[in-house]
Every structure is written in structure tokens, then in C-alpha cells.
Image (cartoon, rainbow, N blue to C red):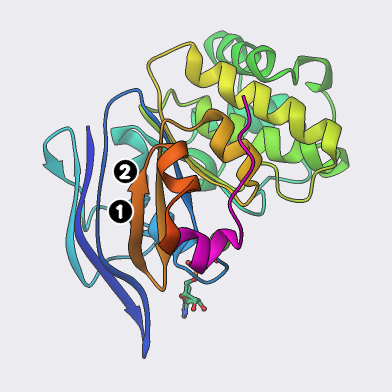
Amino acid sequence: MLKIENLCKSFGGVVATSDVSIHFPKDSLHAVIGPNGAGKTTFFNLISGAITPDSGRIVLDGENIVGLPSTAIVRKGIGRAFQVAKLFKTLTVEESLRGALMSPQGTSAQMYGRFPLAQTRDRAFEVMEQLGLHTKANVVSGNLSHGDQKLLDMALALVLKPKVLLLDEPVAGMGPEEREQMIETVYALWKKGGLTLVLIEHDMEIVFRISQNIHVLSYGKVLAEGNPEQIRNNPAVIEAYLGKPQEAHA
Ligand SMILES: Nc1ncnc2c1ncn2[C@@H]1O[C@H](COP(=O)(O)OP(=O)(O)O)[C@@H](O)[C@H]1O
Ligand SMILES: [Mg+2]
């Protein structure tokens, strides 16, 4: 479905992505983990077309999408939510979602006037209900809680019905209750089917609980790959990242 092949990217002397190859099968739930500066966000920037790799291929359903503008990549079905939510702070939740639907390039697009089409309203409410944002349809985005801003950022990607959804630290900065709610929402979204989900996350309890497969990045390289059990007990991963063997969670 999504195959990353020998991807490389350097910034000056910093090798952020070093010969990374990862296969994300259709409808799987993957996590990408690793220490700060390991190259996780860069990896998403490469897939989403925000930056161009120095070499390597990003193959979506058989097509190499390297070099396509990020707008085209969104249209091909790769959606993304950001480590720091990118929102139209002065628009309401509903307006933001309808705006994303009306724009040719998804979330980061220029907006077109008003959004009169009934379809955009229906789709916006469908996604708001899915994420539990429907009671806040008329709230101005800048006034949402931190957790709801992260949800809206995810909603802006989801509203375009992506095949692949990239989530960069969806629970970052959240309290325990908000975090639990967010992770349940994300898991339910994936469980419903039809979505390949790739998650960057620091909270190992969450990663081990919901991921099918995990890739560990360290200094831009894939250090290890496996299911939660394998990763939890991998000596190289414990050494580079986990510190000590992690408790098992159901
Ligand atoms: N646009 C950029 N210009 C220069 N260096 C960058 C840029 N983006 C990332 N880097 C560097 O690449 C490395 C990986 O960063 P990043 O992908 O943000 O890591 P992570 O998300 O795993 O914390 C870091 O050393 C970072 O400073
Ligand atoms: Mg990051």
C-alpha cells in the first residue's frame, strides 16, 4: 500500500533520514518511535511532500509520489495531522472543515469565500461526530482547548477521506483524561476500517497498547522493527530509547 524505499534526507551536515525502508500494509496501524531528533517528523514531512528526499522512493499503491507537490499527495489520499496543530484560528470548527473541503489542496489552502454547499456541511458534521467535536461546531478554533485543537487538526485531514493518515504525536501536551479520550478516538477510527494509520508517539504505554507494528528510528536510521512484544524486549531499543524493559499492558 505505502512503501518507503531507501529514503535519505540531509540538512547540511545533519543526516535526518538515512536509508529508511518501511512497508505500511493496507489498513494497518503502525507506530514510529525514537528519541527527540531521531528524524520522525522529517519522515512525515518527506511522505507528505512538505520536503523532498535526496534519494529513495515513496510508493503509494504502486506509484512513486516523490516530487509531487503536497497538494497532489493530499489528493492521492495521504492525510496528516501535525505535532503542533495548524488551524485557521479565527474560523469556527464547522467553517474550518468546510473550508478544507472546498479548497483544492486540503488543510493548508487558500479559502474561497463562503461554503454554501450542503454536501460540505454533511461531510463536516460526519467527521465532527466521529471525533466528538459536533457540540463545538460553532466554536472559534482559537478558543478550543488544546485537546480539541488537536482533534480539529486531525479532522481537517480526515474530512478529505484519506487512505493513509499520519499522526504526529496526537496526545502531546494532554492531561491523562484528554489523552485517554484521544487515543480511544484514534483507535476507534482505525478499527472502523479502510484507514492505514501511522502514528508518531512518545507515550510508550499507548504505542504498545494499540500498534500492530513498530519501527524505531535512531539518528535517522531504522534501529529495529517488530510487534510491541519484540520491541519492548529488543536490547538495542532498550539501550537507545526505552531505558529499561517496559511493563506489559493489555
Ligand atoms: N528543516 C530543517 N532544517 C534543518 N534541520 C532540520 C530540519 N528539519 C529537521 N532538522 C533536523 O533533523 C533532525 C531530525 O529532526 P526531526 O525530524 O524533527 O526529529 P524528531 O521528530 O524525531 O524529533 C534534527 O537534528 C533536526 O534538527
Ligand atoms: Mg517531531
Relative to 90, does residue 234 appear above or below in the rendering?
below
Q: Position of residue 20 (x, y in %)?
A: 26, 60
Q: Is mark 2 within 8 Å of ligand 1?
A: no
Can you see residue 105?
no
Give the image quadrant in which the ligand numbered 2 is located.
bottom right
- SS of the residue at dot 1? loop
Q: Are marks 2 and 1 in contact (CB under 8 Å)?
A: yes
As drawn, the label of residue 69 is 1
Q: Residue at x 57, y 22 (%)?
A: 187
Q: Secondary structure at mark 2?
A: helix
From the viewer's side, name the closer residue of 112 and 12. Answer: 12
Give amino acid for label 2: Ile
Name the amino acid, label 1.
Answer: Pro
Query: Does residue 62 appear in the picture of this structure?
Result: yes
* Magenta segment: 237-250
Badge number at residue 73? 2
Residue at 68% across / 45% down in the picture? 87
Q: Position of residue 28 (x, y in %)?
A: 36, 27
Residue 141 vertical position relative to residue 235 in the rendered view, above or below: above
Residue 23 occupies which quadrant of the picture? top left
